Amino acid sequence: MSTKILIIGSGGREHAIGWKFQNDFLQKEEELELFFTPGNAGTAQIGTNVALSSLEDMRDFALENLIDLTFVGPEVELADGVVDLFQAANLRVFGPQKEAAQLEASKAFAKDFMAKYGVKTAAYQNFQGRHLAKEYLQTQEFPIVVKASGLAAGKGVIICQNLEEAEKAVDEIMLDKTFGDAGAEVVIEEYLEGFEVSILSFFNGKKIVPFVSAKDHKKIGEGETGLNTGGMGVIAPNPLFTNAHLKAFEEDILEPTKCGLIKEGLKFAGVIFFGLMVNQKGVYLLEYNLRMGDPETQTTLPLLKNDLFDVVNKAINGEEFTLDFTNQNACCVVLVSGGYPGNYEKGYEIRGLEKVDCPWFVAGAKQADEQIVTTGGRVINVVGLGDTLQLAREQAYENIKKVHFDYQYYRTDIGLV
Ligand code: AMP
Ligand code: GLY
C-alpha cells in the first residue's frame, strides 16, 4: 500500500518539500502519493493538486483519502489552527498548534516569551495604543524599529532613522491600518547592526534539532538595495556563520527557547525557524517563524541526507532523531516577475524548464492548457549544488539562463559574500 502525504501551500517551499519526499521514496523503492492544496504547476508534476477552500475541507479530505501525514507549509493556516483541527480528528500532522503558532503570528507574544526565558534579543516594548507608543519614542535613541505585531507577510517592519519617521510608522500601522489587524499592537525595538542568518529546525516536543545555516537575500536590488521581498535567493551553509556563532546560538537562543516551550506546555512536532542577527556582541534572535522558510527550504532540503518522512514521523512520535547534511553548498536564485515586489503582470508563458539540470521549483505558476504561465511575483527557484559555494553559484546561474518569460528579473549577486 502506498503512503499518502498532503502538503498545504502553493509555493516553491511546498514544491521542494514534495520533491524531497518523492526523492526519498524513490530511493527506498516505496510507493508514495502526494497531494497538494492548492499546489502549483510544479507540484502538479509530482502529485495531485486539490482545491480545498477551508481548513475543515482540508481535514475532511485527509480523512476521506486516508492521508498518512499532513505537512503544513504557510503560517496563516497554522495561526488559524489547522493543526488543532487535524489532531482533533486523529490525523497525523506536522506543525504547531494555534497557541504555539502565536510565536510567529504575534511578535508581541514572541518578544514576551523571549524576555521571560532569557532568549537573547533586541530590547523592546509592546504597545496597544498610539499615544503611549509615541511617548516612549520620545525617550529613545535612533535608528529604532517599529513592527506591526501580527502577520503581515514580512512587510510589517519599519526601520526608522529619527523620531519623525518613527511617529509616522506608528501612525501608519495603528491609525491608517496599513497592515490591517496585524497593527492592533506594535513592538518598538532596539535597532541591531550585523548580518542575518536563517536557521530552520525540527522540534519533537523535547528537543530542537537545527538545520544547516542559511543566508537569505531579502532586497529586490543587487547589493541588498531597494524594497524588501519574500526572498530573492538563499545560500547554505551561511559562510559568515562560524562554529563559535553556532555555539552562541545554541546557548543563548536554542536552549532557552526549548526550556520555555516545555515550561509553557507548548510541545509540538513541527518547524522552528530562527531569524538571527549576528554582531560583535553575539547572536540575537529577531524572530521566530513556526514554518519552513521560503526560499530557505528550497536551498537546504537538497542538502538533507535523512529520509524526511522518517524524521517527521519521529518528531510527531516524540522520538529522538538527528539531522545530517551533505558537505555540499547550495545556491538558490529566484526568478521573479518584473515590477515585483510592487505591481507586476501575470500570465506569461515560462519556457525552458525542461533544459534545467539541477533542482528547480515552481513558486508562482500554473498550468494553462499546454503551457506553464506565471501567476505570482516569485515565479521559479533554481538551486545550484556544488562542492564549493562558487560551484553552486555557477550551476544556479548557468541553469537560470535557460528559463525565460517576459519581463523576468533575477539578482546576479546571490551568494557573493
Ligand atoms: P522580522 O520580520 O522581525 O524578521 O523583520 C524583518 C526584517 O527586518 C529582518 O529580516 C531584518 O532585516 C529587519 N529587522 C527586524 N528587526 C530588526 C532589528 N531589531 N534591528 C535591525 N533590523 C531588524
Ligand atoms: N525567507 C524568509 C521567510 O521565509 O520568512
Image: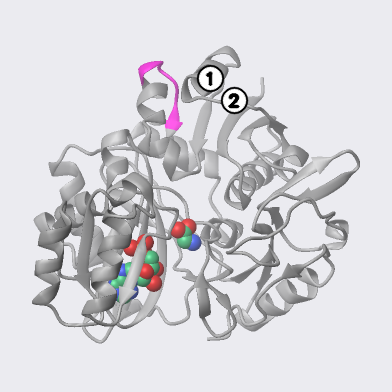
| Quadrant into which the N terminus falls | top right
Residue receiving disc 1: 57
Provide residue 351's location: percent of width, then percent of height. Answer: 87, 58
Provide residue 27's location: percent of width, then percent of height. Answer: 69, 44
Q: Are marks 2 and 1 in contact (CB under 8 Å)?
A: yes
- Taking the image as drawn, is residue 44 in sight? yes
**At 18% across and 62% down in the image, what residue appears?**
119
Q: Earlier in the sequence, mark 2 or mark 1?
A: 2
Mark 1, secondary structure of its residue:
helix
Residue occupying the far top of the picture: 64
> Which image quarter: residue 332?
bottom right
Image: magenta residue range: 88-93
Q: The residue under label 2 is which amino acid type?
A: Leu
**At 15% across and 56% down in the image, what residue appears?**
127
User: Left or right: 65 with respect to 150?
Assistant: right
Residue occupying the far right of the picture: 370
- Disc on res. 52: 2
User: Left or right: 109 with respect to 377?
Assistant: left
Residue 325 vs residue 70, the one in the foreground: 70
Provide residue 150's location: percent of width, then percent of height. Answer: 32, 49
Q: The residue under label 1 is which amino acid type?
A: Asp
Secondary structure of the magenta portion, mostly? loop
Mark 2, secondary structure of its residue:
loop
Q: Is residue 90 magenta?
A: yes
Q: CA distance from mark 2 to mark 1?
A: 6 Å
**At 68% across and 72% down in the image, what residue appears?**
410
For mark 2, does the 10 Å Cα neighbourhood hold few (<14), some (14 to 19), or many (20 or more) residues? Answer: some
Q: Is residue 49 magenta?
A: no
**At 33% across and 55% down in the image, what residue appears?**
176
Count every numbered label the image shows and give the total.
Answer: 2
Q: Ligand 2 closer than 8 Å to the CB at disc 1?
A: no
For mark 1, does the 10 Å Cα neighbourhood hold few (<14), some (14 to 19), or many (20 or more) residues? Answer: few
